[in-house]
Image (tube, grey):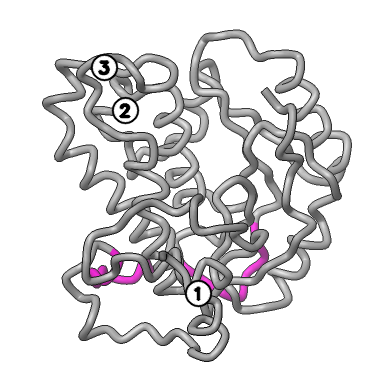
Amino acid sequence: VLRDDFYVASHRFTWEEHKFYQSHAGRTLDQDPRFSDSESVPRIIFGIWSGQNDMSSNRKRGWESVQRLNPEIECVLVTPSNLADYIREDMPLHPAYDNLSLVHRSDYLRAYLMNSHGGGYTDIKPARHPWLPMFQRLDESTAWAIGFRESGHLWIGDLPKPIGDLPRRYHHLLIADQAFIMRPHSPLTTLWMDEVNRRLEYYADDLARFPGNTMGDNQGYPIRWTGILGDVNGGILLRYHKHLLQDPRLRPEMENYR
C-alpha cells in the first residue's frame, strides 16, 4: 500500500536535510542571485508544441481557450519555429535536447522556461478559468509557485530511497505538473533544471544512438515516460512544499483533449 490515509492525516511532513541529502532532491545548489520572492511574476503563459506534427482540433481548441480566458496576459505557444526566441545566451539547451522524444522535449522545456523566464505553464488542454487572479495571488505572497493540488499518487514517479514513496504518500502537499505559475530562478526551479540536465548528461550517448519518436516508445529509447518530469519533481516539490500555493482554478479539462 503506497498511502495510508490515517498516517497522512495524523502526521505533518517535515523535510529533514540529514535524511535526504543523498537524494537528487536533497542536493544543495548556490542560490541564483536573480531570484526574488517579492517582485511581480512575469505575466506570461507558456504552452509547448515541441514537434513539427500538426496539432489536433481538440488541442487547438484547448490553446484557444487559454488565449480567450486571458486577454490581459501574453500567451505564447512555444514551437520549433520560435523556440530560439526564448533560449537565453547564458542558459543554452542541453545538447541532447534534439534527441528527446517530443513528449520529453515538452518536459524539458517546461523546466527551462520556468527557471529562465518564470510565469505560467499549461499543457495544451482547455482552460476553465482566467489565470489573472492566480498571478495576483502569487504576487501577494512570498511563495515560489502556485498550482492545483496533485490529484493522486499514481501521477508521481517512483523514486529511490531515501525519498522512496514519500511524495506519493504526501501528494496532497504537492502541485500537479499540467498547469502552474512559478517565480523564475527560485531554489525549486534551479534544482529542477539542474537535475533534468544531469539526467540528460547521463542518457546522452544512448539518446544519440536511439533518438526518440513522438511518444518515446521506439525501441532503444532510454528514458521512461516519467524519467525527466515525474521522477524529478515529486521529491523537489515535497522538499519545498511550504513554498507552494494551491488553487483548483488552474486545473485544466482532463477529458477529450487529444
Q: Is residue 35 above or below residue 194?
A: below
Q: Is residue 175 above or below residue 203?
A: below
Would you identify the image quadrant in which residue 33 lies? Answer: bottom left
Q: CA distance from mark 1 to mark 3?
A: 35 Å
Magenta residues span: 25-41
Would you identify the image quadrant in which residue 212 lies? Answer: top left
Instruction: State left or right for residue 194 relative to residue 242.
Output: left
Q: Nearer the viewer, residue 131 or 162?
A: 162
Q: Position of residue 62 (x, y in %)?
A: 76, 29
Q: Amino acid at mark 1?
A: His
Extreme-front residue of the structure: 1
The answer to whether marks 1 and 3 mark residues whose Cβ atoms lie closer than 8 Å is no
Instruction: State left or right for residue 3 relative to residue 146.
Output: left
Q: Which residue is mark 2?
A: 97
Q: Could you tell me which residue is drawn at 40 percent across and 74 percent down?
A: 239
Helix, strand or loop at label 1? It is: helix
Q: Nearer the viewer, residue 200 or 226?
A: 226
The quarter of the image holding the C terminus is top right
- Which SS type dominates the magenta stretch? loop
Q: Which residue is mark 1?
A: 241
Q: Could you tell me which residue is drawn at 27 percent across and 33 percent down?
A: 223
Residue 38 included in the magenta stretch of the image: yes
Q: Nearer the viewer, residue 16 or 92?
A: 16
**Mark 1, other Cα within 10 Å: few <14 / some 14–19 / many ≥20:** many
**Mark 3, other Cα within 10 Å: few <14 / some 14–19 / many ≥20:** many
Q: Amino acid at mark 3?
A: Pro
Q: CA distance from mark 2 to mark 1?
A: 29 Å
Instruction: State left or right for residue 60 relative to residue 71.
Output: left
Q: Which residue is mark 3?
A: 211
Q: Amino acid at mark 2?
A: Tyr
Q: CA distance from mark 2 to mark 3?
A: 10 Å
